[in-house]
Amino acid sequence: MSNQQIKILLVEDNSDEARLIQEMLSEKNIFLFRLECANRLSTALKRLAKGGIDVVLLDLNLPDSRGLSTFIEVQTQASKIPIIVLTNLDDTELAIKELRLGAQDYLLKSQIDSNLLMRSIQYSIERKQTERHILHLNSVLKAVRTINKLIVIEKDKNNLIQKACDILVETRGYNTVWLGLLRDDGTFAIVKNAGFEKNVSYFSEQIEKGKLSPCMKKAIKSKKQFEIVNKSELCHSCFFEESCIGEEIALIRVEHSNKLFGLLAISSTTDIVTSEEEKSLLVEVAEDIGFGFHDMEISDAHKQTEEKLKENYQKLQRSLKDTIRVLALVGEMRDPYTAGHQRRVAQLACAIAKEMKFSEERINMIWMAGIVHDIGKMSVPAEILNKPSKLDEAEMTLIKRHRQAGFEILKDIEFPWPIASIVLQHHERLDGSGYPLGLTQENIMLEAKILSVTDVVEAMASHRPYRPALGIDKALEEISRNKGVFYDAEIVEICLKLFDEKKFEFK
């Protein structure tokens, strides 16, 4: 947790309990905070509308709202802010509903102390930040992939330029985008745009006539591929200044093979370069568009397109793997006792897939599914994950729900394979006794059948908070005894062979 002040909104109508929460937070001087209080739902909603709150501590029963509807009202008003439910209601069913709807934690007032409260706040903020970063990465990857597809398919310059502008506005959410293709004499042959509220045809016409703004002239002469426009220096008396008020503008040179083909301009009311991924996106998009222009000028377009596609596919694969690693690390932060579990499950699963003569691409799919198969544990309170004794029925219900939670996290990320469905099914069993769907035999994906075997083997062989490691022999005995009942017989035989004959070991 950084030293930046954390702004907490406590929604609680009991002044004694509010004072107790204040004392707990004051007791832990590890991070700075500013606590604001609201004793009614209406007051809380008005404060949230103003912005600036980092986390909400929410009592469900207030003078003007009670129960689940209280949480729904607050989440609707502040969907991007982590919400921790503080309540006197020891209601497991309600807790599960809250967590499914997006609550970051559900704490009983009678059981919390300063340490638990502090950890919950830290985890909640970190998880919410990670969720936002994952969504950001997903939109970055989607924009790159969509434009790459466009470059391969579209051979008309006007359509290519216009559609590229539209994709960047629609997929990444920039306010405005314009893209211009230069002539050899330094003037623009084609200028297209997207996102402008007003008719800016006059702007395009002026640029095509050679009337360039100061920032355009600088970008054409500059050697820097990416630059944020310094408005205080360059925007005075610019004929297009009114359209840029309140916006940050980035200009990117559209280049290929050391040749400048044009300029790409992006504007947004927020900081454009929010991360290195954002800057890399814009540079890569400009390079890809530059390649598209170059490709239109040469006769052997087909060969070069294939080479660029292969390169872009490899980039996308690397980006997907990086996204997967981020997800895996987030999951392991929540459950230190199983740190490395997902990697070892993926390792054994890939070894089995190789024995089954899977293609390299299919093995990649197995690895990605294995490395995040427990990502849904982000939705399970840390106290349950690290409980040193046997879990009760209600706690087991929360643990089991992490399959569905993992599916919800992964389903909107545009993988080229059904990663989310594999994660959802990896606790299904051939005889229908598994969960969450009770699938049988051929209804279970083969990749999920592999993970179900490797997950059991690694889990039994490793230490857990509530028991010591049972050892690999016990694990192999379990899958052998239930071969054909719970687990796929062919997969079990290959797994046994790996350990018995090929001396497989977890790294």
Image (cartoon, rainbow, N blue to C red):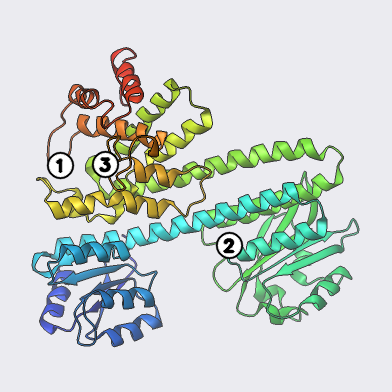
Identify which residue is drawn at 43% across, 26% down. 353
Closer to the chain start, of discs 2 and 1, is 2
**Residues at marks 2 and 1, CA–CA distance in whole angstroms:** 43 Å
Q: Residues within 10 Å of mark 3 (few under 14, many from 20)?
A: some
Residue 368 placed where, x, y %? 43, 39
Identify which residue is drawn at 70% across, 49% down. 288
**Residue closest to the eye, 243 or 416:** 416
* Residue type, label 3: Gly
Closer to the chain start, of discs 2 and 3, is 2
Q: Residues within 10 Å of mark 1 (few under 14, many from 20)?
A: some
The residue at which mark 2 appears reads as: 172
Residue 476 placed where, x, y %? 23, 23
Identify which residue is drawn at 36% across, 80% down. 48
The residue at which mark 3 appears reads as: 434
Relative to 484, residue 297 above or below: below
* Residue type, label 2: Arg
- In the visual, does 23 lie left or right of 359? left
Mark 1, secondary structure of its residue: loop
Residue 493 placed where, x, y %? 32, 20
Q: Are marks 3 and 1 in contact (CB under 8 Å)?
A: no
Identify which residue is drawn at 35% across, 22% down. 490
The residue at which mark 1 appears reads as: 465
Mark 3, secondary structure of its residue: loop
